[in-house]
Amino acid sequence: MLVALATAVAQTEGGSSPENTVLLARIQQRAAEDLASVPNYVCVDSIDRSRWIPGQRDFRRLDRMYLDLAHIEGADRFSWLGSSSFQEKTPSAIVGYGASFSGDFADNRALVFKNRWTTIRYAGRVTIEGRPAMRYEYAVPPNHGGLAAIIGNDSGFAPARGVFWIDPETLDLLRIDIEGYDIPPSLPLQSVVARTTYWRVLIGGRGVLLARNSEFLLTERDGTVKRNVSVFSNCREYQAQSTVTFGPSTTSQPSPPAVEPTRLQAGLQLQVVLDTPVDPSAAAVGESVRAHVVESSGEVPKGARVYGRVNRIVRYVDEVLIYLEITHIEYRRNRVPFMARLIAVESQPGKPGMQIRGFGYFGDANIVRYDPPGAASLYISEREPVLRRGLVMRWVTVESRRGSP
């Protein structure tokens, strides 16, 4: 996790002409106005994560995540797509694994334009993405702002430097590249780079300069490169009448009206059929899944609706792990947390068999993490890595967690 840290106003480096100095002052003023005018808003953050290992030809896609990102009172918070429960965590902390960069969406701009120690040098006119631009180079000296890095249990601080580009007509910021240098030896990294492009978005009836997309590259000591590519879309203003809570996310589905919370008796066996196919080549972490009950014991009726999300997709050499989190079950007027353990997986009667196994997943340091209630780690052969509609899962309910309704 990397966090851009900075305050105040950037200053020019010696050697600039008076004309360039005046122009840079106008750019700084425009950037300060843009930062001050950013409203509270919510966007969809689509993140493609991939990895390159030395010797490979191309990056290998790991997964895709869909999250909601709320920018409220100058701070970024994330939640599962469609949930109203935002958390002050990075995307990787939300899903529980992988690398991510928390500052690329909102304001690397502060590091460049609001830090009085940042030096800026005009570097000439160029063309970027087919359009003319003015290029500037900047650097933040050690101990005066930069990047705070947290990798596992290790943390450190690195100064930052990079490049930004400005539209010569509008003076709008087009792109910022940022690099952490002099990385502390305690961190197992060679380099960290983030690139963010900007555009004007209409929010609440006014044009606001926001991030359009970003790329984050983290190079480890052995040469392995982790890459996240984010695209930000469907941005809308966060209105006062919106319902947003801060705390642990409980569901990616909107709550239906007139539903009464309750709990399931322990020891009930449920046969659940998957209604939403999951193809790991197209599915995204955070996408919702639906299923329904076809056989049950106790008070749960046939046809009860089951909801959840894709929580993890990991490709191994000859199989793919699809980790499902089943959040709740609805029947009659009840909406119940799905507190059950998976005991069997099989194909729908009359359908071709599938090679699926499930027992848990490998966490950090290759330690096996067994599935908690409501979760299913399903390993599928790489030859046909799709959870088809009609997949049958057998669950048995367990005691609710303390504090669950």
Image (tube, helix red, strand yellow):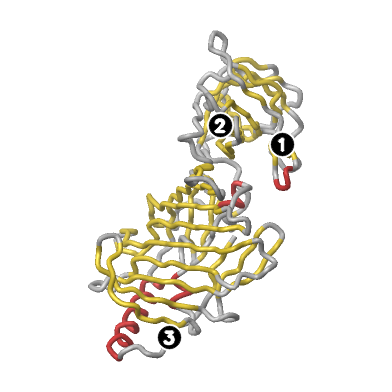
**Secondary structure of the residue carrying numbered label 2:** strand
Q: Are marks 1 and 2 in contact (CB under 8 Å)?
A: no
- Tell me which numbered mark, 2 or 3, is placed earlier along the sequence: 3
Tally the numbered discs: 3
- As displayed, is residue 170 above or below residue 395? below
**Residue 11 numbered mark, or none:** 3
Which residue shows up at 63% across the image and 49% down it? 248
Task: Give, as a three-letter code, the residue at label 2.
Answer: Tyr
Front: mark 1 or 2: 1
| Nearer-the-camera pick, 124 or 108 | 124
Mark 1 crowd level (few <14, some 14–19, many ≥20, 10 Å Cα): some
Q: Quadrant of the C terminus?
A: top right
- Tell me which numbered mark, 1 or 2, is placed earlier along the sequence: 2
Marks 1 and 2 sit apart, C-alpha to C-alpha, by 16 Å
Front: mark 2 or 3: 3
- As displayed, is residue 329 above or below residue 243? above
> Does 346 sit left or right of 172 as displayed?
right
**Residue 372 numbered mark, or none:** 1
**Secondary structure of the residue carrying numbered label 1:** loop
Which residue shows up at 51% across the image and 79% down it? 140
Residue with the mark numbered 2: 307
Mark 3 crowd level (few <14, some 14–19, many ≥20, 10 Å Cα): many
Q: Quadrant of the N terminus?
A: bottom right
Q: Quadrant of residue 119?
A: bottom left
**Secondary structure of the residue carrying numbered label 3:** strand
Front: mark 1 or 3: 3
- Tell me which numbered mark, 1 or 3, is placed earlier along the sequence: 3
Task: Give, as a three-letter code, the residue at label 3.
Answer: Gln
The picture places residue 124, in percent across and down from the top left corner, at 30, 77
> Does 271 sit left or right of 61 as displayed?
right
Marks 1 and 3 sit apart, C-alpha to C-alpha, by 53 Å
